[in-house]
Image (cartoon, helix red, strand yellow):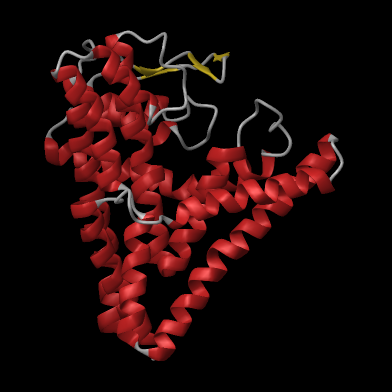
């Protein structure tokens, strides 16, 4: 019975992966991450009222937020999947495939970033500025054309790990439950895990939890992207060099891993100072400016991202399949 469950889980990951590639996230479909976001907002309001407005009190409130959101985000799909498997294994396969699909974001990341490139092709710089503002957290009003293209490339590079490889890895480790546990942690970090606007203490545990959850996936993602740079012949030697040199050039212990590989592979200088929520953040550069950034680099970054995703899928499947179908 356990082997059957694991095999169905493996199939559901592959099915969900293919559906995500082909369809992405339809706007009409109610995405569970939206529900996770609403839960975070609701619990945040409650815990801010309950816990004292002191550094220790806000940190404790943020810790309770992380625990509660993780329990609900993992517990609900676990319960539904257990019920489906008890009713019929194929019902489990259907629901698990649906959840695996919704945990991944390859199609959406490519689609949203390519909107920036399409606006550039139309000669609409302001349209490109608006499109990139939808996928980055920084203030885009001060960016020139190269800055807009650079921001889009950085988003694709960083989210190759956060949006695709990391959830894919957690799907292989824990099925749809693992995938949604990761999505919950990632969503908490994006909503409360920063230092401005009263979140310095309240968001501390969420930010640290996200760092822990992404530590191994970020480094595996960088290695997968290095292999992708070899396959695509995108300056693999320079990608290795820049990754080795600049992979720690970020306040986050994880964010520069794939960004440094992408910068080296494309021959670009990424990162640097940026404005977030009206505050200037001094940030080191990543990569060397072997050439100027151009809009077509968004296409190159997406090709690198998609190839990285397939490298990850093939390698993770090559590890999982023999264990599921030969050993067990």
Which residue shows up at 47% across the image and 76% down it? Answer: 80
Q: Nearer the viewer, residue 42 or 165?
A: 42
Residue 282 quadrant? top right
45, above or below 247, in the image: below
Picture coordinates of residue 85, whole percent (x, y): 40, 85
Picture coordinates of residue 106, whole percent (x, y): 28, 47
Picture coordinates of residue 31, whole percent (x, y): 41, 55
Q: Is residue 157 left or right of residue 213?
A: left
Which residue shows up at 47% across the image and 64% down it? Answer: 178
Instruction: Inspect this view and state whether residue 242 appears.
Output: no
Residue 91 quadrant? bottom left
Which residue shows up at 29% across the image and 14% down it? Answer: 126
Which residue shows up at 71% across the image and 29% down it? Answer: 198
Farthest residue in the front direction?
A: 28
Q: Is residue 235 left or right of residue 177?
A: left
Q: Nearer the viewer, residue 294 or 245?
A: 294
76, above or below 327, in the image: above
Residue 292 quadrant? top left
Quadrant containing the C terminus is: bottom left
Picture coordinates of residue 309, whole percent (x, y): 25, 49
Instruction: Inspect this view and state whether residue 298 appears.
Output: yes
Q: Nearer the viewer, residue 10 or 176?
A: 176
Quadrant containing the N terminus is: bottom left
328, above or below 106, in the image: below
Count how many numbered circles sit on residues in the image: 0
């Amino acid at each position: 019975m356990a082997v059957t469950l694991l095999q169905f889980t493996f199939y559901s990951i592959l099915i969900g992966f293919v559906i995500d590639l082909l369809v992405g996230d339809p706007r009409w479909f109610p995405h569970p991450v939206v529900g996770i976001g609403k839960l975070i907002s609701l619990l945040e309001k409650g815990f801010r009222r309950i816990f004292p407005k002191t550094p220790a009190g806000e940190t404790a409130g943020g810790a309770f937020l992380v625990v509660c959101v993780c329990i609900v985000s993992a517990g609900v799909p676990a319960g539904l999947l257990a019920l489906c498997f008890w009713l019929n294994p194929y019902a489990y396969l259907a629901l698990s495939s649906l959840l695996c699909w919704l945990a991944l974001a390859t199609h959406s990341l490519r689609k949203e970033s390519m909107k920036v490139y399409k606006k550039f092709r139309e000669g609409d710089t302001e349209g490109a500025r608006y499109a990139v503002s939808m996928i980055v957290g920084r203030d885009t009003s001060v960016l020139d054309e190269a800055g807009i293209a650079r921001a889009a490339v950085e988003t694709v590079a960083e989210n190759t790990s956060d949006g695709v490889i990391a959830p894919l890895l957690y799907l292989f480790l824990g099925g749809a439950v693992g995938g949604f546990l990761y999505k919950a942690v990632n969503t908490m970090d994006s909503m409360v895990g920063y230092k401005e606007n009263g979140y310095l203490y309240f968001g501390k545990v969420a930010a640290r939890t996200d760092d822990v959850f992404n530590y191994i996936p970020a480094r595996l993602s960088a290695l997968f992207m290095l292999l992708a740079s070899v396959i695509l012949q995108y300056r693999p030697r320079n990608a290795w060099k820049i990754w080795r040199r600049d992979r720690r050039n970020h306040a986050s212990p994880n964010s520069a891993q794939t960004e440094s590989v992408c910068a080296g592979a494309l021959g670009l200088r990424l990162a640097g100072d940026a404005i977030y929520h009206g505050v200037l953040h001094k940030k080191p550069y990543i990569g060397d400016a072997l050439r100027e950034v151009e809009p077509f680099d968004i296409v190159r970054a997406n090709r690198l991202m998609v190839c990285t995703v397939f490298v990850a899928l093939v390698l993770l499947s090559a590890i999982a399949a023999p264990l599921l179908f030969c050993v067990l």
